[in-house]
Image (spheres, rainbow, N blue to C red):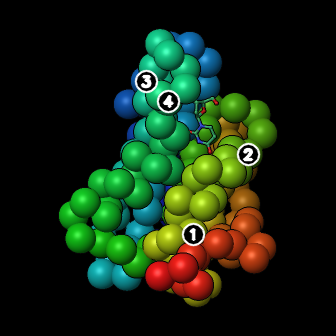
């Protein structure tokens, strides 16, 4: 599954809309029902309205009723790994299952594997306000 997810994330680089940064990102999320949802970064002339690849994939999954993510793969066009930005870490945290994997791949094909929870220690779930 790791290889499939990484391959799907790399495929998404072709759909990246990134005329401002010229930095392509692709993501593929695996849900606990075995489905894969993909996304790419989508930039905007206002810059601030840009959406990261991870959140593109996440909103596709959640809007189809899939709210339990077991893994995410992130590919980028750069020569260093594209770890998810702070906003994406918080956004994904909402839907991560314990042990969710984070797979990364960079331009030269090198890969890395992490535990998603370790990317956001003491992450906020808001359980005390709900
Ligand atoms: N980007 C992502 O898609 N994911 C990240 O986690 C980091 C940044 C995108 C946003 C923007 O289109 C480009 O990378 C440069 O920041």
**Which residue carries the number 1 mark?**
93
Q: Secondary structure at mark 2?
A: loop
Q: Judge by depth and name the residue closer to the eye, 23 or 106.
A: 23
Q: Which label lies toward us, 2 or 1?
A: 1
Residue 81: give its label: 2
What x and y, as percent, mark residue 83?
70, 50
Task: Pick whichever of labels 1 and 4 is earlier in the sequence.
Answer: 4
> For the view shown, which residue lies furthest in the left direction?
64
Task: Pick whichever of labels 3 and 2 is earlier in the sequence.
Answer: 3
Ligand number 1: quarter of image: top right
Query: Real-space Cα distance between discs 2 and 1?
Result: 20 Å
- Left or right? Give the position of 20 relative to 7: right
Residue 17: give its label: 3
Q: Residues within 10 Å of mark 2 (few under 14, many from 20)?
A: some
Task: Pick whichever of labels 1 and 3 is earlier in the sequence.
Answer: 3
Question: Marks 4 and 1: in contact by CB < 8 Å?
Answer: no
Task: Pick whichever of labels 2 and 4 is earlier in the sequence.
Answer: 4
Q: Residues within 10 Å of mark 1 (few under 14, many from 20)?
A: some
Query: Real-space Cα distance between discs 2 and 4?
Result: 20 Å
From the viewer's perspective, is residue 23 above or below residue 75? Answer: above
Q: Which label lies toward us, 2 or 4?
A: 4
Task: Pick whichever of labels 4 and 3 is earlier in the sequence.
Answer: 3
- Left or right? Give the position of 15 relative to 121: left
From the viewer's perspective, is residue 127 above or below residue 42? Answer: below
Residue drawn at the location 49% of the way across and 29% of the way down: 50
Residue drawn at the location 62% of the way across and 66% of the way down: 102
Residue drawn at the location 54% of the way across and 79% of the way down: 129
Q: Residues within 10 Å of mark 4 (few under 14, many from 20)?
A: some
Residue 50: give its label: 4
Task: Pick whichever of labels 2 and 1 is earlier in the sequence.
Answer: 2
- Left or right? Give the position of 13 relative to 124: left
- Left or right? Give the position of 19 relative to 21: left
């Amino acid at each position: 599954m790791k290889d499939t997810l990484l391959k799907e994330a790399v495929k998404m680089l072709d759909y990246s809309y990134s005329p401002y940064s010229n930095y392509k990102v692709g993501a593929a999320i695996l849900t606990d029902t075995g489905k894969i949802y993909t996304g790419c970064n989508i930039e905007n002339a206002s810059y601030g309205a840009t959406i990261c690849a991870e959140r593109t994939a996440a909103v596709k999954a959640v809007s189809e009723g899939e709210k339990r993510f077991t893994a995410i793969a992130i590919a980028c066009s750069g020569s260093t790994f594209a770890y998810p930005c702070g906003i994406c870490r918080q956004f994904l945290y909402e839907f991560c299952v314990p042990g969710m994997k984070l797979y990364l791949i960079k331009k030269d094909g090198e890969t890395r594997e992490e535990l998603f929870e370790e990317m956001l220690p003491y992450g906020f779930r808001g359980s005390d306000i709900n």
